[in-house]
Amino acid sequence: MDSNMKILQENLTKYLRNKTFLTGFCMFSFIILFMLAGTIWLPYDPNLTNAAAKLQPPSFHHLLGTDSLGRDVLSRIMFGLRISVIIGFIVMIFGLFTGLILGSICGWFGGIADTIIMKLVSTQMAFPGILLALMLVAVFEPDIKVTILVLCIMSIPRFTRITRSGYIKFKNSLFVQSAKARGAGNFRIMYIHILPNILSDLLITATLSFSMAILNESGLSYLGLGVRPPYPSFGRMLNDAQHYIFTNPTGIIFPLIFLIILVFGVNLIGDGISEVNGK
């Protein structure tokens, strides 16, 4: 246990010494703390309208101003972050585990399973992600559950290809041959011996999947095909504020700033992992 903790501390120190990773980690931590603060305290109900206070600039009563319906922008950003981060994590975890299972089967066993799965993966990747999302969402009634399902499906191919490449690379390695000689079974070799060697690639892909899920959800919500009103989403907020960009620019500026910090921070974490591992 002590040796494992020592290895964990050494790895954490190695990452925190990387400026790119540290910058991204600080940006993402700020967003998470800001989001968690919103679960404990919100200045106002994010869906509370007030016709007498619409399109107000930042003030003591509304720190980031109000939108066209008089709703507090700060409260809506704090609540909207919760939606974006939850969707990002769900999509990332689903894509990671599903892609890991499919990719490991393809890379380790090969054969007909590899052919069929990779044909399906290649077919899906032939479509631009947002176009595929628009097609699928248009078939069903726009809803947050449908949006999450569509984004989860979109996240699978990237993880599958990365995992498959890693297993093909290492399945004939000396440490794998040694494990086979000691009588290790397929499951143990696949997930105990090979998986740790491709973990950094999967983590980099996970950060990309997380940020892409948030951007795609925002894009769908902006088009009215994602999170339904009155729930706040960054795409929904940008759509509502675009008509008042000259009279009330803060309605677009502040949600955009938080969205950029979130996505850019996660991408920097991925870049930092890549730099530390020499990818």
Image: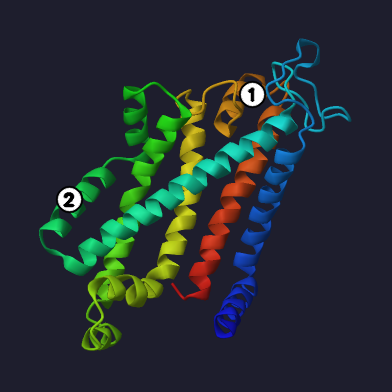
| Residue 273 drawn at (x, y percent) | 52, 68
Q: Which quarter of the figure has residue 99?
A: bottom left
Give me the residue at 59% from left, 72% from top.
15
Quadrant the C terminus occupies: bottom left
Q: Which residue is mark 1?
A: 241
Taking 106 as reference, is 240 above or below it? above
Looking at the image, is mark 2 or mark 1 nearer the viewer? Answer: 2
Residue furthest out toward the left: 112
Give me the residue at 32% from left, 63% from top.
163
In the picture, measured across the screen, residue 28 lies left or right of residue 216, that is: right
In the picture, measured across the screen, residue 159 lies left or right of residue 263, that is: left
Taking 151 as reference, is 196 above or below it? below
Number of other residues with Cα within 10 Å of mark 1, as a class: few under 14, some 14 to 19, many 20 or more: many
Q: Which badge, 2 or 1, comes first in the chain's sequence? A: 2
What is the secondary structure assignment of the residue under circle 1? helix
| Residue 80 drawn at (x, y percent) | 62, 35
- Which numbered disc covers residue 151? none
Q: Which residue is mark 2?
A: 119
How many numbered dots are placed on residues in this image? 2
Taking 58 as reference, is 23 above or below it? below
Give me the residue at 39% from left, 55% from top.
96
Quadrant the N terminus occupies: bottom right
Q: Amino acid at mark 2?
A: Lys
Number of other residues with Cα within 10 Å of mark 2, as a class: few under 14, some 14 to 19, many 20 or more: few
Rounded to the nearest whole Å, what is the CA distance between mark 2 and mark 1? 42 Å
What is the secondary structure assignment of the residue under circle 2? helix
Q: Amino acid at mark 1?
A: Ala
